[in-house]
Image (tube, rainbow, N blue to C red):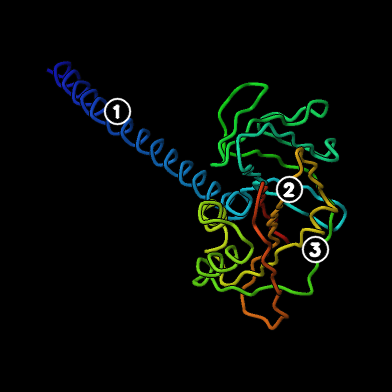
Amino acid sequence: MEEILENTEQLENLEKTDKAKPSKRKKRLKGILIGFLILVWIFWLLFWIFYVLILRDMPWRCDCHGDECQCLAKPIIYLYPTEETQINVELWSPENLSHTYPKYNSEKWWNVIAQPNWDLEDMDTWRKLYALYREWKSDNETNFDEWFVVAWKDIIPFFEEKLAILWLNEREAEEFIVYWLPQMENNEYNLIRFETIEEQNENMLLNITPKPDTVIRVMMDWKAIDRSIDISEQELTTPERKGFTVVEWWGSPRD
């Protein structure tokens, strides 16, 4: 009898142990799951911190020279001959080029067939294009004497007005605006300045054959600020757009 009772107690203990095992497993699995979710949350938090502090504000490439850091973004060139024309475009200081499309050959230059409607055909690859693109390193300094102070809510009408004065057509202005708008519309205010063509030629002169009748170069320096300031407003001049016309625009955010 005693032996039977002893066996019964052993069976009851085994049943209790078996019941406890699933409970412990569940606790371990729950702990692992919670730990995994915590790691995912930490990783996501770190990613957003990195994005907000670094990636969001750097959609361009930067070239720093001493205390001056200039980031050149989307330099693009349009060619408008009055009739179908073979055009050569030479870029000065090709050693400073960082990216080009189509690929620039310093011995052959860019060699394209251009149409009056701005369609291009690269004579090296025979690919159809609408513009020429290049980025380069620059160490030119910014003139901080005259700027425009533009609130975020006014940025679109500001560009529409000023780019028309600088003689960009509506399609060129649209490409300019949609490229820069996401970077500037989130700022309370923006300081904006357009470099003169003399300043641009000093930094990167274009040599184009045949020689164009009109060259329009729109280079924008800008920086984000958190409040409006009193500053001398820049005066813009309107170039005359006639004959074989070359148009270029790009921009440079400043610290």
**190 and 162: which one is in front?**
162
* Kind of residue at badge 2: Cys
Contact, mark 1 vs mark 3 (Cβ under 8 Å): no
Q: Which mark is residue 132?
A: none
Quarter of the image with the C terminus in it: bottom right
* Kind of residue at badge 3: Thr
Q: Above or below — where is 127 with respect to 135?
A: above
Label 3: state its secondary structure.
Answer: loop
First-in-chain label (1 vs 3):
1
What residue appears at the point 75 percent right and 62 percent down from the top-left corner?
Answer: 195
User: Which mark is nearer the camera, 1 or 3?
Assistant: 3
First-in-chain label (3 vs 2):
2
Q: Which mark is residue 142?
A: 3
**Picture coordinates of residue 133 (x, y %)?**
66, 39
Neighbor class of circle 3 (other Cα within 10 Å; few <14, some 14-19, many 20+) is: some
Quarter of the image with the N terminus in it: top left
Q: Above or below — where is 178 with respect to 127?
A: below
**Picture coordinates of residue 185 (x, y %)?**
52, 64
Q: How many marks?
A: 3
Residue 226, by quadrant, is bottom right
Label 1: state its secondary structure.
Answer: helix
User: On the picture, is 65 further left or further right than 215?
Assistant: right
Neighbor class of circle 2 (other Cα within 10 Å; few <14, some 14-19, many 20+) is: some
**184 and 140: which one is in front?**
140
**58 and 119: which one is in front?**
119
Neighbor class of circle 1 (other Cα within 10 Å; few <14, some 14-19, many 20+) is: few
What residue appears at the point 50 percent right and 69 percent down from the top-left corner?
Answer: 157
Q: Above or below — where is 219 with respect to 105?
A: below
In the picture of the structure, the residue carrying the numbered disc 1 is 21
Q: Which mark is residue 62?
A: 2
User: Which mark is nearer the camera, 3 or 2?
Assistant: 3
* Kind of residue at badge 1: Lys
